[in-house]
Each structure stands twice: as C-alpha cells, then as structure tokens.
C-alpha cells in the first residue's frame, strides 16, 4: 500500500508518552506524526500514559502533558489510559508465557551482565547465565524470556526493511524486573493488543525494540501491527532531545510556530502564510495535506 493512500480498515493509532518530564519538541514530533497519520486515514487517535516505571515518574507531569496536547488542539478519541492501573493485563500476559515454558528467573546484576564480552546492538547481551544455573531463591530475581535464532523482519513505512535475530542481537530480555516492575516491552505489547491498536507511529529510537515486540505478539497470539518510525530530534551536540539532555518544554505562547516547525521537521511543506492562521486552520491543512512519504530517515 502506498504510504499516502488512506487506510481502509479501521485505523487505531496512539501517542504514549512517559511522564518523566514536560512535553518537548522531540516528543511533539511523535505526537504530531501519530496524530496526523491517524486523522489522515480517518482513524482514531488514543493517548496512553506509560507510567509503569513508577520510580521514574514525576508527579504532575502526566496532567501537564495532557494539558499541553489539549492546548495544541490535539483531541484524543477515547479516555486516557494509564499503565500503572493496568498491571492485571501484564500479569495475564506473563502467566501465558510462563505456561508456554518461555520464562526463567534471573538474579544477575547489571555489572555482571556488563562484564560479558558479548556486545549486541543495545550494548552487552545477556550471556544466558541463569538459563542453565539453578536460582538462588533468597535473592530478588527478574524474569527473562527465552529468545531463539529466528530472524524477525518487518517493513517500516519510513526506514524500510528491518530485521534482527534476537538471540544474537539482543539476547534473552527482561519482562519483569527484580523490583517487580513490568518491563516496557511486555507492557506496550499487552496495551496495544488490549486497545486494538493497528498502527504504531513513534520515534526511530524505538526501532530496535520492534522485533522484540513482534516476537511477543506472536507468542501471545496478538495481531501484527504496522510501524512507522519517525526521525529523532537532536540538540546541537547530536544528542536525542530528552529530559536528560535538558530539552526545553513546549512554549504554549508560541504554539503555532512550534507546530509548523514540527511539521517541517517531518518533511511536510506548509505554506508560510499558515503562520498567520490559527491552530484549527493549521490542523485542517496539515491533516488534508499529510504525506508520510515525504518523511526522511
């Protein structure tokens, strides 16, 4: 299907920020890209607050993100979902994988794993120590999933074909941490299935997570999704914009110029006079003229 052909089946997209800091330009790129792609395809756009990692969550930030989206004229189509309130569906998914005999407890520390000589695309690969050794029951343990040498490949709407062999490139990865927190990879897959998401539009920094998520989708019997990974906004030092790199929050006094800048970052070609309009007119033009095939990678 051509990237700019409206999707015929019901399209359900989502924006899923983590409430670790205010919305900044980098996260706005993902929000705008996912919103426009959903609306261009006459689909629904949902917002999910990914606050499963409670130690990293900053109080009040989720509400601030929602207020910012609202002020920017971005309307979500269903009630906002919070991961911290959905642990039952993650536990259900975990139990299914345990039933299949695919999880094992792991007591290895980060230092022990970092000392491994095996390096993959995300850094040190877990060497499988606890795959073969009995668990020391008195220690807290994570739950890891067994990976294999099957090649997982998918076609990204921006970057094209992408593939991984998980056991070689990633290794057995954690689905529940030793502190009891469910891992992102499990939570996002369970959430997307539960919310009947069909299309994922997000930053390219999550591209290498996608094969892990496809792997879990297969094992859990969830539908396969379509993916589009957007270019990542960086600062002058070439670092991804984030709370850690002190990215400036969205300035609502300059809402329209920042939306136009975001649109241009995504390869779109809004006319200069759009800056003289209002936000409603901006969205009308942007949705009508959305061209996913203009996004660079």
Image: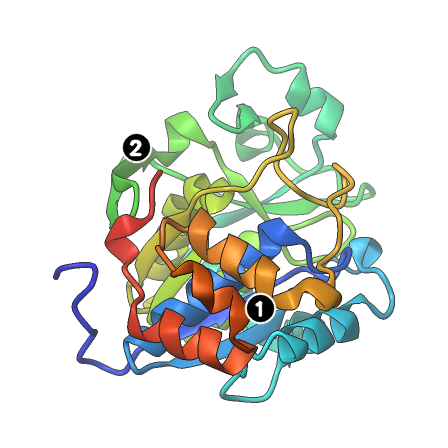
Q: Residue furthest right?
A: 59
Residue 119 vs residue 258: left or right? left
Say which element carries label 2: loop
Q: How many marks are shown on the rendered structure? A: 2
Residue 259 coordinates in the image, percent (x, y): 55, 62
Reading the image, the residue beneath label 1 is 90
Label 1 crowding class (10 Å Cα cut-off): few <14, some 14-19, many 20+? many
Reading the image, the residue beneath label 2 is 149
Q: CA distance from mark 1 to mark 2?
A: 26 Å
Q: Tell me the quadrant of the picture where the C terminus can be found.
A: top left
Front-lying residue, 74 or 104: 74
Q: As displayed, is residue 135 above or below residue 181?
A: above
Q: Residue furthest bottom?
A: 78
Front-lying residue, 229 or 259: 259
Which residue is pictured at 56% across the width and 11% down the height?
117
Which residue is pictured at 78% across the width and 51% down the height?
179
Say which element carries label 1: helix
Q: Which mark is residue 226?
A: none
Residue 288 coordinates in the image, percent (x, y): 30, 75
Lower position in the chain sequence, tag 1 or tag 2: 1
Front-lying residue, 225 or 177: 225
Rendering quarter of residue 87: bottom right
């Amino acid at each position: 299907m051509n990237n700019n052909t409206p999707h015929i089946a019901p399209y359900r997209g989502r924006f899923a920020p983590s409430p670790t800091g205010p919305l900044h330009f980098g996260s706005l790129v993902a929000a705008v890209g996912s919103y426009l792609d959903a609306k261009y395809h006459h689909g629904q756009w949902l917002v999910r607050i990914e606050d499963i990692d409670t130690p990293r969550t900053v109080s009040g930030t989720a509400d601030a993100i929602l207020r910012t989206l609202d002020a920017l004229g971005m309307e979500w189509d269903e009630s906002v979902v919070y991961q911290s309130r959905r642990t039952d569906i993650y536990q259900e998914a975990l139990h299914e994988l345990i039933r299949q005999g695919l999880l094992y407890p792991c007591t290895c520390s980060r230092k022990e794993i970092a000392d491994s000589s095996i390096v993959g695309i995300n850094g040190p690969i877990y060497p499988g120590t606890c795959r073969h050794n009995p668990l020391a029951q008195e220690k807290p343990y994570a739950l890891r999933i067994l990976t294999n040498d099957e090649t997982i490949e998918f076609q990204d709407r921006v970057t094209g074909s992408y593939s991984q062999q998980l056991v070689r490139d990633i290794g057995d990865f954690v689905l529940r941490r030793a502190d009891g927190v469910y891992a992102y990879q499990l939570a996002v897959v369970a959430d997307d299935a539960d919310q009947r998401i069909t299309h994922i539009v997000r930053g390219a920094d999550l591209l290498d997570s996608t094969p892990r998520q496809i792997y879990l989708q297969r094992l859990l019997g969830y539908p396969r999704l379509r993916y589009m990974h957007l270019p990542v906004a960086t600062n002058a030092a070439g670092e991804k914009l984030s709370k850690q790199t002190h990215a400036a929050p969205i300035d609502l006094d300059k809402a329209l110029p920042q939306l136009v800048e975001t649109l241009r970052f995504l390869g779109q070609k809004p006319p200069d006079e759009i800056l003289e309009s209002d936000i409603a007119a901006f969205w009308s033009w942007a949705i009508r003229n959305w061209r996913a095939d203009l996004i660079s990678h």
